[in-house]
Amino acid sequence: MQKPTFQQLLDAGVHFGHLKRKWNPAMAPYIFMERNGIHIIDLHKTIAKLDEAAAAMKQVAKSGRSILFVATKKQAKEIIATKVAEVGMPYITERWWGGMLTNFQTLRRAIKKINTIDKMETNGTFEKLSKRERLQLTREKDKLNKRLGSVADMTKLPAAVFVIDVMKEKIAIKEAQKLFMPIFAMVDTNSNPKGIDYVIPSNDDASQSIELILDVITKAIKEGLDERKAERVDKDKQKEVKKTKAPIKKQAEAEVEEVKTEEKNNSVEE
């Protein structure tokens, strides 16, 4: 995995924290200094923590499990939708739906509702409904799709959660904690890192900072997915080789058995 350079982090403004008066003392280990009333994040620690988080993310992806990305703040929505979609992971960019993790059946019912409406549109049922009923169902489906985002394709609970802004996504974090899911997060100087398994001390407000961190994370996920794919290809090749060798092995065993039988018969005749 390629680590971002110190200069790249500086250029993206990853080091800018919040005003000193807004800080959370629990973030003290990650703060380098205070400048003009603003806390400056220690980028050396950011690099180390980002590397740790990326390595863990890679292993989750390599195992074939999913990671749910949560970012409902305006400056992160488009970045999440673009970068996370590229690696095929689920994400939430609209308001968090309470119970999305802890009451997964609620989510499954919403997904089922979308699928039912889709089926009605294709099997001719829509044509039998009034214009008003069709409009209501279409609006309901659009509303659910917007609210669910890409999690509409999620058939089981994710293995981990990645959050941008732990203060804004408190409900999502609480639900993940109840289910003992590993939590990855960009944590700014005004936030509490307690309960976050993989803290990435960074500016969670600037779009450039968010984009750089996500770029590293999604590349790590892609590496994990690529390695998983390569391993599966190797296993398939090994199976094919075994299948090819099996008849040859059986034939060789048969020939050896035939020779043994012939030798035995010769010894009896003598």
Image: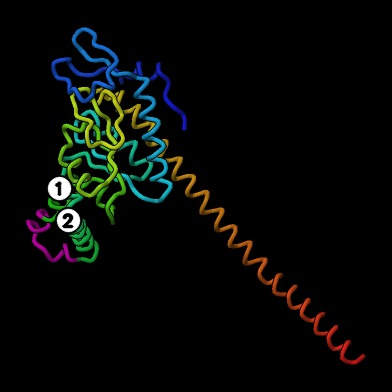
Q: Which residues are magenta?
A: 125-136
> Helix or strand or loop: what does disc 2 sit on?
helix
Q: In the displayed image of the protein, which residue is found farthest to the top?
A: 36
Which label is found at residue 235?
Answer: none
> Helix or strand or loop: what does disc 1 sit on?
helix
Quick check: 181 above or below 249?
A: above
Residue 249 image position (x, y, % from top left)? 70, 70
Residue 145 as seen in the image, left or right of residue 245 = left
Q: Residue placed at 32% from the left, 28% from the top?
A: 211
For the stretch drawn in magenta, the main secondary structure is helix
Quick check: 187 above or below 55?
A: above
Mark in the foreground, 1 or 2: 2
Q: Look at the image and say whether residue 129 sits in the magenta stretch.
A: yes
Q: Which residue is mark 1?
A: 143
Q: In the displayed image of the protein, which residue is found farthest to the right?
A: 270
Q: CA distance from mark 1 to mark 2?
A: 11 Å
Q: Residue placed at 13% from the left, 47% from the top?
A: 98
Quick check: 80 above or below 246?
A: above
Q: Look at the image and say whether residue 239 sits in the magenta stretch.
A: no
In which quadrant of the rendered view does residue 183 lie?
top left
Residue 86 as seen in the image, left or right of residue 148 = right
Which label is found at residue 110?
Answer: 2
Q: Amino acid at mark 2?
A: Ala
